[in-house]
Amino acid sequence: MYQVIGTARSRAMRVFWMLEELGQDYEIIESGPRGKAISDINPSGKVPALIVDGTAIFDSVAIMQFLADRHGALTYPAGTVERAVQDSFTQFGCDEMDGVLWQATKHRFYYPEELRVPQVRKAAMWDFDRSMQSLATRLGENEFVMGDKITVPDLLLSHCAGWALGMKFELPKGRIGEYFKRLRARPGMRRALERAGKNAA
């Protein structure tokens, strides 16, 4: 059984969802950033961590791709052109969505108050809107970013969309809005939310 350190209100949610999509059992070790459970194994104090055979793996995206590769699902094989395209969507999610949202989040409540710059939020929203325009063009009429097959970046992008909603960013209507709704309505996402919620109760 896998162990995941983190909470549903963090990037650990991506890992919970991934494990549900893969049909893998896991234990949630509740810990927010810099909590004892995570700080004991990760000097940065960042969540999530995945414990596999006594080894801790950090960074939600690295964990997701590891799990996809290990279980041969939600991914194309390494070294294929399809995997390169898939990875480009993953990188897009990290750079153009996660990075923008994290920058806005840090200036909202993470940084000490004297370091916060309220104007960053406006710039981040502008960046996010441009990213959504780019994603709409790349997605086209596809069901998922890679066509008719769900892959790692779909979960990443959709999780970032939920984060954006929590930050009061505006999500686009039309194809992209429906794409996010479709993904977030998946049974695996629902199960992950329910399980994480029960664990926190």
Image (cartoon, rainbow, N blue to C red):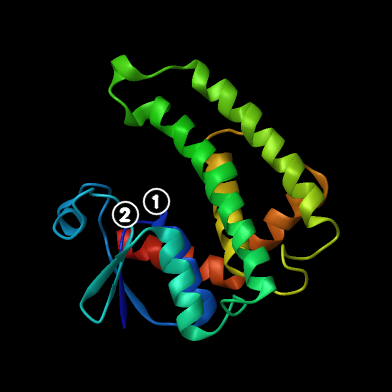
Residue type, mark 1 in image: Ser
| Side (left or right) of 140 relative to 191 | right
Secondary structure state at the residue bearing disc 1: loop
| Secondary structure at numbered mark 2 | loop
Q: Nearer the viewer, mark 1 or mark 2?
A: 2
Place of residue 148 in the rendered image (x, y in percent of width and height, measured from the top left): 77, 73
Q: Decide which of tag 1 and tag 2 comes sooner along the chain.
A: 1
Image vertical order of residue 126 relative to residue 25, above or below: above
Query: Which quarter of the image is occupied by the C terminus?
Result: bottom left
At label 2, counting other C-alpha atoms closer than 10 Å, the crowd grade (few under 14, some 14-19, many 20 or more) is many
Label of residue 10 in the image: 1
Q: Which picture quadrant has residue 122?
A: top right
At x 20%, y 78%, the residue is 54
Name the residue tied to disc 2.
47
Residue at 17 percent of width and 53 percent of height = 39
Residue 171 in sight here: no
Number of numbered markers: 2
Graded by Cα atoms within 10 Å as few (under 14), some (14 to 19) or many (20 or more), the crowding at tag 1 reads some
Disc 1 versus disc 2: distance between alpha carbons?
7 Å
* Residue 198 pos. (x, y %): 36, 65
Could you tell me if the residues under marks 1 and 2 are in contact, i.e. CB atoms within 8 Å?
Answer: yes
Classify residue 149 by image quadrant: bottom right
Q: Residue at x 46, y 60 (%)?
A: 61
2 is higher (above) or lower (below) than 194: below
